[in-house]
Image: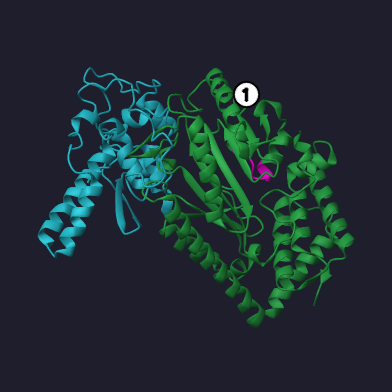
Chain colours: A green, B cyan
Amino acid sequence: MTVDELIRRPGAWLLTDAGPDTEIAVSARIRLARNLRQAAFPSWAGAEECVRILNRLRPAVESLPCLDGAWGWEMSELDPVDREILCERHLISAELAARNRGSAVVLRSDESLSVMINEEDHLRLQVMRPGADLMRLWKEIDEFDTALGELVPYAFSPALGYLTACPSNVGTGLRASVMVHLPALRLMHEVEPVVKGLNKIGLAVRGIGGEGTEAMGNMFQVSNQMTLGEGETDLIRRLEAVVQELTTHERNARARLLEKHPARLRDFVGRAFGILMQAHILSSQEALDLLSALRLGIELDLVRSLGGGDLNRLMQSILPGHLQRQARRDLPVEDRDQLRAMMVRERLKEVGAEPAF
Amino acid sequence: MKCQACGANPATVHLTQVMDAKVREIHLCESCAEQGGVNLQNALSLSELLLKIGVPEEGAATPDGAERSCPGCHMRRSDFKKTSRLGCAECYTAFASDLAPLIASMHKGERHVGKMPPDGGGAPTVFPVEPASAPAPATPPAPVGPTPEQLQKQLAAAIAAENYEEAARLRDQIRLLEEVLARVPTKEITP
């Protein structure tokens, strides 16, 4: 199995057929940080020790029934484009991508369950699915984690919980996040107060690329910051309630736009159409921002002959790693931007997408 | 007021963070604030800041002046300060006094609530206890007596009986016990 085989299909976080449930809350994931009891954490362990730890952990991970037929790669087997593709599919972090021998990723073939070995911690377990059903994700990863815990002695203290390389993850070691698409709130300049409000209750809001990145395509990731002092299910219920509220907020903003500023809304969607249909140079940032406008248009019935699923596939295929692999070579940025513009034009023409106003 | 990071210059930058009804304050001099990249736009940088510039330097060295290090992985205190990442699980015991304020500033609580591994985390650690000046033995060991859970029950009973004086006493006892438990290394809590 090679990374190439992944790129022909949508990632686990994207639905092929987006429904109303995934319109605003696009996808959710939960990751658990776990470490071996008596071994140095990956950043402090030398390369040889990392290899030993990997050789011990990988068979244990792969022996679990829920990872039957899993795929796995040691980072040193992968070229830079492979690594970029795995990052774009949210299967590995930039930190793991920067590592080599002694670090690996193991994933179930549907990509919804994956394990990074020797990233910041010995183990990072992850589940992700479209929508925002965090409780379902928690049940899934909880079971997986318990099964793995039978095979691997986890570093744990009754006072501080699961012990992690960075004290910011100690406790449950759990980070739950939901990706939300908030174009109307952005258009109404209402994202900032929302972010501030969420920060006050201990939740972080980040752009799609993760830490420290600008929001691309109006996608934001809402996640917990604190891992000590609140149980898993309490946190998840709290986060689910917040996402529910955020979804309502965005829906209201859309309704207000439709009612009070219909011209502004049509202009927003129409301009995006115009550029996407005619541009010959498109950066990822610009393309994702414009596709976000199109997504809003689809969801408000302002676009004909283009579904959420088409859009998701298109969005993924124009990311730098996916784009280069499809072109079968490394491309300089200018060539990538031209290829991206061409792919978007062709795809939109192919499905006959057009504004419905 | 002196800067809490360097302890030398007067503190001119005062940061307050309110989270979940907890108020945390930190006072810094200009150069330490700058070193920590204090960004007034970013309300959440307080814990990162503490990570970067460190907190009061108590128990930094062993009595003979040597730098404290982790018996499990030999990470030195200065290594941790540099990377902000610990070397192994044992570091949580070795650097308990450095970590306590950091963890308190980062998290909702100071004690784990939630899942436990199937084996309950295994036997207490095998590494030797540090010299007498180390923070762990310096704090009184967790009292061998009621657990916080038992006290909570007594507290509930006292409130139900409207015995508020007793309730207040129990509440303070619980708080103290939890503080001690959070600071004391794990081996002293496991029965």
Please name the residue shown 33% across and 21% down the image.
B127
Image vertical order of residue B7 relative to residue A22, above or below:
above
Please name the residue shown 63% across and 34% down the image.
A105
Residue A118, percent from left and from top: 55, 30
- Name the secondary structure under disc 1: loop
Question: Which one is nearer the viewer's eye here, A111 or A64?
Answer: A64
Location of mark 1 (residue): A101
Q: Is residue A131 magenta?
A: no
Residue A81, percent from left and from top: 73, 36
Identify the magenta region.
A87-94
Q: Majority secondary structure of the magenta segment?
A: loop
Residue B111, percent from left and from top: 32, 44
Image vertical order of residue A132 relative to residue A189, above or below:
above
Image vertical order of residue B93 relative to residue A299, above or below:
above
Question: Which one is nearer the viewer's eye here, A164 or B66?
Answer: A164
Q: Amino acid at mark 1?
A: Arg
Please name the residue shown 68% across and 45% down the image.
A89
If the image is split into quadrants, where does the C terminus of chain B sit?
A: top left
| Residue B39 seen by the camera | no
Residue A98, percent from left and from top: 62, 32
Question: Which one is nearer the viewer's eye here, A223 or A116?
Answer: A116
Q: Chain of mark 1?
A: A
State the image quarter where residue A320 is shown: top right
